[in-house]
Amino acid sequence: MSDYQYINTWIEDSIGRMELNRPKVFNALNRAMVREIVHCLTTFDQSEEVKVIIMSGAGKAFAAGADINEMIEDTPISLEKLNQFEDWDKISFIKKPILAAVQGFALGGGLELVLFADIVFATENTKIGFPEVNLGVMPSAGGTVKLTKTLGYRRALEWLWTGEQMDVRQAYQCGLINRIIPSELLIEETMNFAKKLSKQPPLSLRLIKDTVGRAQDLSVHESMLVERKNFYLLFGSEDQKEGMRAFMEKRPPAAFRGS
Ligand code: CO8
């Protein structure tokens, strides 16, 4: 893989692994690191070999937010010129399933990165939250929007205004994470789930992600039109023919090919 400074990346059983790697500062996300993350995710998305992507953090945390050191002297104009959110936006266009394996702190920009994942597994010791308010700022990579869509207006405001950390059970009850996993099994269970997904028809996964993602923004009627078009599209795939023929012939389907 590319020569990255702040992340480790590798491919294992068709799973693209990306591990944030600044453990001394709880994987605080500096800007170069975010560029590496986006480059890595985009490369995995384009790779024939990779079917599913897993994001995780080295050491005791997923990520304790954006690197505060880098932001202290920022001004509105420097931020406008930097245009860093163009990088973050690219993560929304990743078509393959992204899983997050989360442990320890997932705060601020770290939690925003988690919320770009499609499926989130987290350990008992996970602490999530948006502490930006304590720094005199607020989330800016989609945090307020995604929290509001998941929790609703009042509960989102409570967490955003207080900046308090939510424990993993609260996060689970709120629907922010999919599963709570014992620490020692986090990577194994996330890998098992990723491997299961990697055997599913890739085009179905891709278009289901597209449809569910759009359903969050569009009206019910518009979402159903997207659903219908994506359903039609899958009838152009070999995997649909094989999947349905195999069912009728009472045999397991051949490996799905994504074509
Ligand atoms: N940025 C820079 N350094 C950090 C960060 C951070 N976000 N978090 C931790 N560190 C560093 C500490 O400075 C410390 O460094 P050193 O050893 O050199 O003193 C080291 O990591 C260990 O941290 P602590 O000593 O504080 O460890 P504790 O166990 O006492 O506390 C906490 C751990 C609770 C995680 C604490 O470090 C903390 O509160 N960190 C900051 C959390 C935070 O406020 N996050 C939000 C940042 S702002 C943000 O994310 C805005 C996102 C905008 C979008 C993205 C734009 C790029």
Image (cartoon, rainbow, N blue to C red):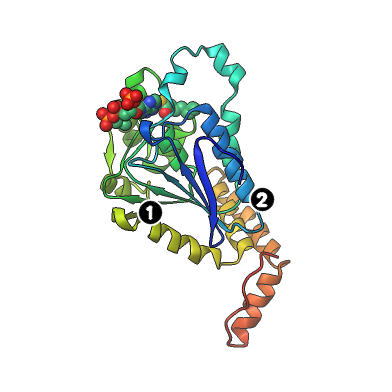
Query: Nearest the camera: 30 or 142?
Result: 30
Residue 227 in which image quadrant? bottom right
Disc 2 is placed on an element classified as: helix
**Amino acid at the residue labelled 1:** Asn
Q: Residue at x 43, y 40 (%)?
A: 149
Disc 1 CB within 8 Å of nearest ligand 1 atom: no
**Which mark, residue 178?**
1
Q: Position of residue 254 (x, y in %)?
A: 63, 77
Question: In the rendered view, does 29 fall on the left or right side of 49?
Answer: left
Residue 162 in which image quadrant? top left
Q: Residue at x 35, y 35 (%)?
A: 156
Q: Position of residue 7 (x, y in %)?
A: 50, 40
Disc 2 CB within 8 Å of nearest ligand 1 atom: no
**Amino acid at the residue labelled 2:** Gln
| Ligand 1 quadrant assignment | top left
Q: Which residue position is annotated with label 2?
A: 46
